[in-house]
Structures are given as C-alpha cells and as structure tokens.
Image (tube, rainbow, N blue to C red):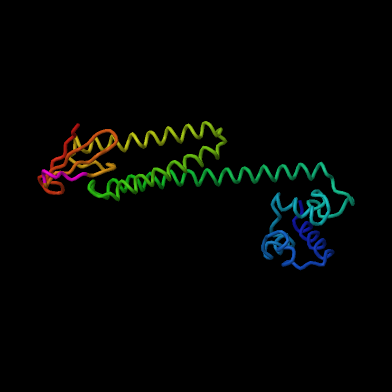
Amino acid sequence: MDSQKIGSFLKQLRNEKKLTQEDLAEQLNVSSRTVSRWETGRNLPDLSLLVELAEFYDISIPEIIDGERKSETMNEETKATAVKMADYSKKEKNHLTMKVIGISLIVFSLFVMISALMVFPAESSWGSIYAILSGIVLLIGLALYLKSISIKRIYRLMAVIVCAACLFGIFNVSDYVAVTQFNQVPRFAYEKEWSSSHENEVIYKTLFFNAKATHNGSSQQKVEIIK
C-alpha cells in the first residue's frame, strides 16, 4: 500500500470537486490538518472515514486503497462489507470505552466509600452520605461494565440488584459491629430521637435494630442495642 499515492489520489479527487481542505474537513467532520495529513501520505483515513470518502467521491474503496480509478461504478458488495466492518469497529470501540468507564467508576466509588467511612467520625452524617452516594456510583459502574462485556439485560439487572442488596447488608452489619464491638453510634440510622426523660440519651433507629447512646460524644459515651 503506497500512502503517498493514496494521498495524491485523494488530493486529485478533492480538486476535481473544487473543494478546499477546509471544505472537505467540514463535510467529514474532521480537522483540515487531518485532511492535509491524508493528502501528504503521513496518515491514512480510518475505516469508517474510508467508507465516507468512497461515498462522497462516488468511487470504490479498493480504488482509494490502490490510489487510482479502476471503474466508474462502485463495487456494492465491497462497500457493504466495509460498512459492516466499520460498524463492528465502532461497536468494539464503544464497548471498550464503556468497560474503562465502568471499571473507573467502580474503583473510584470504592475508594470514596472506604475513605468516607475512615475519615468521618461515626457521629457525622457525612460519612454515611458519601458512602451511600458512592454505592450508587458503584452500581452504575457495575451496570456499564456488565453491558460492555455483552451480558444480557436480565442478568445485568439481577447482578445490580444483588450488589445493591450486598451493600445494604454490609452497611447494616457494619453498624451492628460498630455498636456492639466499638461502642460507636450507627452511621446509617434513618432517625435520631432525643429522650425527654434523660437529657444525655439519644435513640438511633436503623432498619434492623435500635441503639441507645448515653453521654453521646463524651469520653463516657456508652452505646448499646435495645429492642
């Protein structure tokens, strides 16, 4: 394949249409610098643009690759094959992009989730807020990753639901362990209730248990599970 010959042929075709490099670049949605590189032989058009050039100049793809005209009619079978190859190439590129985004979201969300739970104290609501938001991002990343590897929709949905259930369980188990083993208030309580009879007593309500904290925030803090 002679890239210089191809470049000269592309320049000839453009001149026959009486177009500038800027005009052609606008038609193909590329930069004029890209067109210049094609015509000097420094770069060659990718497969999808090769199809567009063939259609635009009404010639066959083999003619562009050979750098000369061979016939007046375009080989439709060759064109159809090239179009399918271009579509396949785009699809593979989209899948790769989706996979990279999915993995990045999963890694980023796990980092933020772990960091939030380690940095913010149990009494702060910011730790649970960042953890929950990170969990949502993680589920989105998982869905994108599974889609990129062509998993069926029903299985993707099931995987996301299972992952959401696991996160929900982990959050609640971590709260239970924090209360029973580390004398900390639960992070993921949906409601706090201050006792009217005991000034220093706070009730934390979670979906599975309630916890009572006395002398909250002081060195004498005591947290325990209540029915």
Stretch of the chain drawn in magenta: 193-198
For the image shown, how many numbered marks are present on the structure? 0
Image height of 111 relative to 27, above or below: above
Q: Position of residue 112 (x, y in %)?
A: 36, 48
Question: 85 and 146: which one is in front?
Answer: 146
Q: Position of residue 102 (x, y in %)?
A: 49, 44
Q: Quadrant of residue 152?
A: top right
Which residue is located at x 52 percent, y 43 percent? 99
Question: 42 and 121: which one is in front?
Answer: 121
Q: Is residue 111 left or right of residue 101?
A: left
Q: Position of residue 140 (x, y in %)?
A: 47, 43
Q: Is residue 47 left or right of residue 188?
A: right
Which residue is located at x 79 percent, y 53 percent? 55
Magenta stretch, main secondary structure class: loop
Which residue is located at x 85 percent, y 48 percent? 74
- Residue furthest to the front in view is 196
Q: Is residue 33 left or right of residue 184?
A: right
Q: Position of residue 183 (x, y in %)?
A: 17, 39
- Residue furthest to the right in view is 72
Question: 191 and 142: which one is in front?
Answer: 191
Image quarter where the C terminus lies is top left
Q: Quadrant of residue 33?
A: bottom right
Q: Is residue 16 magenta?
A: no
Q: Is residue 195 magenta?
A: yes
Question: 84 and 198: which one is in front?
Answer: 198
Image height of 35 relative to 218, above or below: below
Q: Is residue 111 left or right of residue 217?
A: right
Which residue is located at x 39 percent, y 34 percent? 165
